Image (cartoon, rainbow, N blue to C red):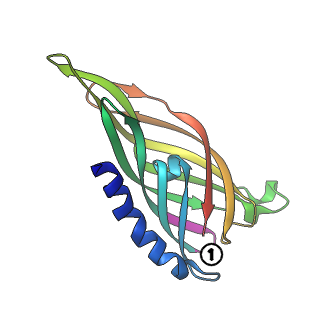
Amino acid sequence: MYTRLLWVSCLLPLLYALPVAAANNPISISVGAGINYTGYGAAVGYSWEHSSISVSAGLMTSSRIYGEHFGGGISYQRNDLLSQYFDNPEKHAFGLYAGTVGTRFDNFGLGGYRYEPLYGAALTYNYFFNGFHDRGFHVGAFLGYGANSDANATPAGLQLGYRF
């Protein structure tokens, strides 16, 4: 119940801000799945020339028994790093992400279990079908490293998102 209320309270301001994310506006709102969205979530970003910076929040894990874990992060992307190798460099972006990169199922004693966040960083690549600064779908991949007090991990995966 409280989780749904939290999600609704987080998504309503994003829906209100959608008209702000119009064409030629440096502010963008995106939704998707992957490291740039901290799991399944949303990101608000600011773009200029060949760069973009965004802040994201999302659902990392969810379990009926052990609850949900939400995370957050910040990412920076550039679309001119390897422009000499691409026919259309405006569609390719490489970047860095810092924040929650995953979760680890942990035993905290006396038979209790919970998800523990893994904080770290990741390298990202995204392909923007309509261009780096335009609204539309994008796909990508990431490779990262994260740790907490008990463990470390090297998450890797794919991501999919839509920029409004």
Magenta run includes residue 81: no
**Start-end of magenta stretch:** 48-53
Magenta portion: prevailing SS class: strand
Judged from the image, the secondary structure of the residue bearing numbered disc 1 is: loop
Image position, residue 74 (x, y; %): 43, 57
User: Taking the image as drawn, is residue 101 in sight?
Assistant: no
Residue sticking out furthest to the right: 87
Residue closer to the observer: 131 or 84: 131
| Side of 114 where 29 appears, left or right | right
Residue at screen point 63% across, 69% down:
50
Magenta run includes residue 52: yes
**Where 162 sits versus 67, above or below?**
below
Residue that mark 1 sits on: 49
Residue closer to the observer: 93 or 60: 60
Image position, residue 144 (x, y; %): 50, 38
Image position, residue 124 (x, y; %): 58, 48
Rendered image quadrant of residue 6: bottom left
Residue closer to the observer: 117 or 59: 59
**Where 94 sits versus 103, above or below?**
below
